[in-house]
Image: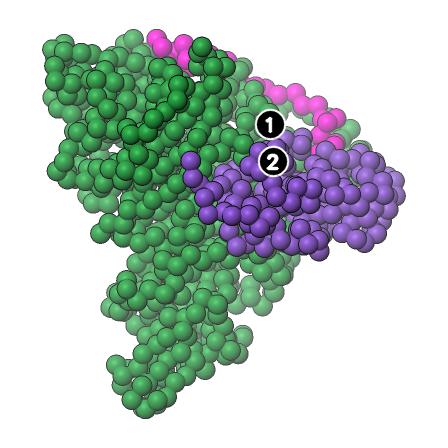
Chain colours: A purple, B green
Amino acid sequence: MTTYRISVNGATRTVDVDEDMPLLWVLRDVLDLKGSKFGCGAGLCGACTVHLDGEPVRSCSTPISSVGTAAVTTIEGIGATPVGKRVQAAWLDVDVPQCGYCQAGQIMSAAALLAKTPRPADKDIDEAMAGNVCRCCTYPRIRTAIKKAAGQNTANAGAL
Amino acid sequence: MATAPIQSDGAPATRGIRSRRAFLRASAIAGGGLLLHAVLPAAARAALTAPSADTATLNAFVRIAPDGIVTIIAKNPEIGQGVKTMLPMLIAEELDVDWDHVRIEQAMLDAAHYGAQVAGGSMATPLNWDPLRRVGAAGRQMLIAAAAETWGVPDSECRTAGGTVYHDPSGQSAGYGALAAKAARLPVPDLKSVTLKDISDFKIIGRSIRGVDTPAIVTGQPLFGIDVTVPGMLYAVFQKCPVFGGKVVRANTDAIKSLPGVRDAFVVKGGDAANGLVDGVAIVAESWWAAEKARRKLEVAWDEGPGATQSSAGFAAGAAALGREAPAKSLRRDGDAKMALANAAHVVEAAYSYPFLPHLTLEPQNCTAEVRDGKAELWAPTQNPGPGARIVAATLGITESDVTVHMTRCGGGFGRRLSSDFMAEAASIAKTVGAPVKLLWNRQDDMRHDFYRPAGFHFFKGGLDAGGKLVAFTDHFVTFGHGDRVADSASMDPGEFPAGLVEHVDYGLSMLPLSVPTGALRAPRSNAFAFAFQSFIDELAHAAGEDPLAFRLALLGSETRLLPSAVDPKNPLRAFNTGRMHGVLQLVAEKSNWGKAELPKGTGMGVAFYFSHLGYFAEVVRASVAPSGSVKLDKVWIAADAGSQIINPINAENQVQGAALDGIGAALGQAITIERGRVVQANFDGVPLLRIDQAPPVEVHFLTTDHQPTGLGEPALPPAIPALCNAIFAATGKRIRKLPIDPAELKWS
C-alpha cells in the first residue's frame, strides 16, 4: 500500500492503495465516483474514459502510480467546464442514450475533442470517438450531439 | 437488511418506502384479483395512506402528493429499451396529467401487483398498451368521482385536463393533489369498463419524451447494478471452469486467502444447470481490484468432463455430413417438393451458416446480495427477476417469498440477463461469507460464460419454373440438441417465410449434440434465419433474372393474405400479414430510391425484409466494397410497420437505428469459436463491436396502420444483416453464405 495525493475534479484526494491499482477502481470503489464505467479492463471499449490534464485516457489501464500531479476530471466533474456543460446539454437534448452505460466515456471523449477542435468534421469525430464503443449503437445520435454541442448544423446528418 | 441505494433520481431510497411496499404486497394477497392486480381493495387502500399521510395511493402504479406531483411506478426492467419512460407514459396519458408533474420510480420484483416483470420479446408495448392505459383511466375516474362528490354534482358534468378536475357549469376546479386522498377511499372502477381517450386527444402518447434517466446518465450518477453500494459490502470474483460443465477438483484457496485484501477464498460446488450455480472458486476481498488481482495467483485443477471434446470445426464437419443426408425430423411438408424440384426449369442450391454469438452487454454480469436469517436481498441488473428469485431460492434452499429483488438499470441486456446464473452465484457467495457481497465478472468471464446465440447451418434448394416463379423451396436445418429437445433458441418455426406462399415446401431439421449453453440473443432465431432465408431468396431472384425487390413483392402477392403462425396459430397478431410487409417494402423502395440510383463500381444496394416480434420491417443497405475487400456502409433505409401508434417517437427511432446497426456489427466480424470445449475469444479484440467510424446514417420511416401497437427493441435487427449481404453481392457479385463477413473473400480489381 502506498499513499497517493491526486487531484480529482478540482479537489485534492488522498488514497492509500496498491501502486498498480487502476485509476478506475480508485475512482469507483475508493472515492465512490461511480460514473466512470468498467467494460473491458484492457482499454478496448472506452467506458472508463477520464481526462488527465484534459487528455482522454482509459482509467482501467492507468495505474494510480502513473497519475502523479495530473488533474483528473471525471464525468462527475466535466460539467464544470464550458465544453463539458455544452456536451452534456447536447446529449440531453438529442436524447442519445439507450442503456446509457457507455455514455460517460463517450461524453468525456467528445468533450476532449471539442476542447481542441471546436468545429469537428465527421472524420475528426470518427478519429476521436472510435475508441468508445456503444453496445446499443447510438452512434448516429452521438454524432448529432457532438455537432450540436459544436453549434453546427445537424439537420442533414442522415443525408447521403 | 441494508437500505436500497438507488432510485431514478440517484438518491438513496428510504426504509419507509420499502416497508410500505412490503405492506402493499401483503394487501394484494389479502384481496387482489383485479386485472394486473393494479388496484387495491378499499380497506387496504385506506390503510395504505397511513404510513405516508401526505401522499395518497390510488393504485399500485400511482401515488399522488398534495402538491399534485404524481409518482408512477415503472414495472419492467430497464435495459436501454426505454420502458422506464414509455410504460409510465401510457398511465400518465389516461390519468390526464402534465408530464412535467410526473416522477418515475422503478418497481421492485412484485408479481402480485405488477404481473410479469420481464424485458424480453419486445413485448412491453403489446402487453401493456391496453392494460396500463386502463390503470391510468381508472385513476382519472376516481379523481373525477372525488371532485363530483365534493361539489355535489354528477361525474358526467366534470372533465379533466393537466392534473385538474373541472366542473364548467359551476366554474369549480380542483387539482389532483387536493382530491387524491378522497379518491383513494372511493370504489374502484372495473378496469374493463373505463373509458379510454380517443387517439386524437393524446397529449403524451405520440410525443417525444426524453429518457427519464438521461439527466442522471449524462452526469454520471449511480444507476446500474455495478454502481450499487451496501454498507459493509465485500467484493467477489468467481472463477468457473473454461470448459462448460467442468467441475472443481481442487484449488489453492489457502494460498489465495493470504494475499493482500483477501477476506476469503473457497470452492463452490454447483449443479449441472448452466442457468444456476455451477462449480467454481470464489475469492472475496475488501475491494474488487484486490479480488481480481488475487485471481492471477489462483490455481485450479478441473475435471473438464465430456464437453472438452467439442469444437466449432467439429460442428461444421458434422453439419456438412448431416447436410448430405435427409433431415432427421420433418417440420413442414406442403405439396411435393422433391417432384417439383425434379421438374423445375432451374434449381438453385446453397449452404448457409452462421456462428455462435455472445451478448456482450457493456456492463459485465454482476449482482449484489445479502443473505441473513434465511432471507435474501439482491440488487441485480436483470431482465428476468421472477425466475431469478426462484433460482436464488432453490440455490439457497429458502422459499421464494424470502427473496427480495431490486431491479437496477441494466447496462445492456440483449437477452443475456434473461438468465440468472450471476444472481445464484452472488447469493451463494454472500451466504457463505455472511456479509453483503458485490459479485462482478470481468470481461473474460462474461465472454466465456454466456448463453450463446446458437450457430446453425441451412442446406437450401429452390426451384423456379420457366417463367422465373418460385415453385419449390426446401431447407434442411442442422442445429443443436439432444434426443427430442432442440437447444435453447435453436429451433425453427415451420411457418418460416416463404412457407405458405410457395406451392411445394419441405422443411426439416437434424441436430448435433452440444455442451455449450445457448440462449436468446436480441431477436432470437430471427437474427440468424433472416440472414439465411433472405439471402437465399436474393439468390433465387437473381437466378430468375428479376429485380430482388420486385421478386419479393411478387412472392408476397398483391392481395393481402394472413398466414397463421405455426407455433401460435390462434393469435392473429402472430399471423404473417402479407399486405403489411408489401406496404413497408414499397415504402423502403421509394425512400431509398431503389433501382434508380446510379452507383459507382464496387457499390451496391441490397434489400431484405423480416417479420418478427409482431413488427414488419423492410430495409435497404447501400454498401461499398474496396478492392482490398473492406466493406463500408454508406446508408441504411428502414421502413417499419409497428401498428397504429408510435408511443415515444424519439426513443422509437433510436431503438430501430440501434437494432439495425447491432445486426450489422455482428455480421461484420463477430463470432464465438469453440475449441476443446471452451471459448477462444476473451475480450473486444477477439469479438469486435461496431464502432462510430463504421456506423452509417440510418433513415427510419414508420408506416402507421390500423393494428395494435407493437414493440421496437428487436424487429429492426434481423433484416439489416441480409440487406447488407445482398448489397455486397450487388457491389461485387460475391455471395455471403457464411457469417461473419470475411473481407479477404471480397477482394476485387
Disc 1 chain ID: B
- In this view of the protein, which residue sits in the foreground, B279 or B505? B505
Q: Which residues are magenta?
A: B292-321
| Residue B306 counted in the magenta span | yes
Judge depth for marks 1 and 2 and give the one in front: 2
Q: Residue at x 27, y 83 (%)?
A: B157
From the top left corner, tell me how far across and down residue B213 is, in percent. Answer: 54, 55
Q: Are marks 1 and 2 on the same chain?
A: no
Q: Residue at x 46, y 47 (%)?
A: A155
Are there few (<14), some (14-19), or many (20+) residues within 10 Å of tag 1? many
Which type of secondary structure does the marked residue at label 2 adopt?
A: helix
Question: Considering the image in quadrants, where does the C terminus of chain B appear?
Answer: top left
- In this view of the protein, which residue sits in the foreground, B253 or B307? B307
Q: Residue at x 67, y 30 (%)?
A: A42
Numbered label attached to residue B125 = none
Q: Please state if B504 lies on the left or on the right of B378 as rendered.
A: left
Disc 2 chain ID: A
CA distance for labels 1 and 2: 27 Å
Q: Please state if A43 lies on the left or on the right of B625 as rendered.
A: right
Q: Residue at x 34, y 79 (%)?
A: B144
From the top left corner, tell me how far across and down residue B654 is, in percent. Answer: 44, 45
Could one spot residue B459 in this view of the protein? yes
From the top left corner, tell me how far across and down residue B50 is, in percent. Answer: 51, 77
| Residue B228 counted in the magenta span | no
Query: In the rendered view, would you say B19 is above or below B219?
Result: below
**As shown in the figure, which amino acid type bears the numbered disc 1?**
Asn
Query: In the rendered view, would you say B517 is above or below B122?
Result: above
Numbered label attached to residue B683 = 1
From the top left corner, tell me how far across and down residue A68 is, in percent. Answer: 85, 40
Query: In the rendered view, would you say B28 is above or below A32?
Result: below
Overall secondary structure of the magenta stretch? helix
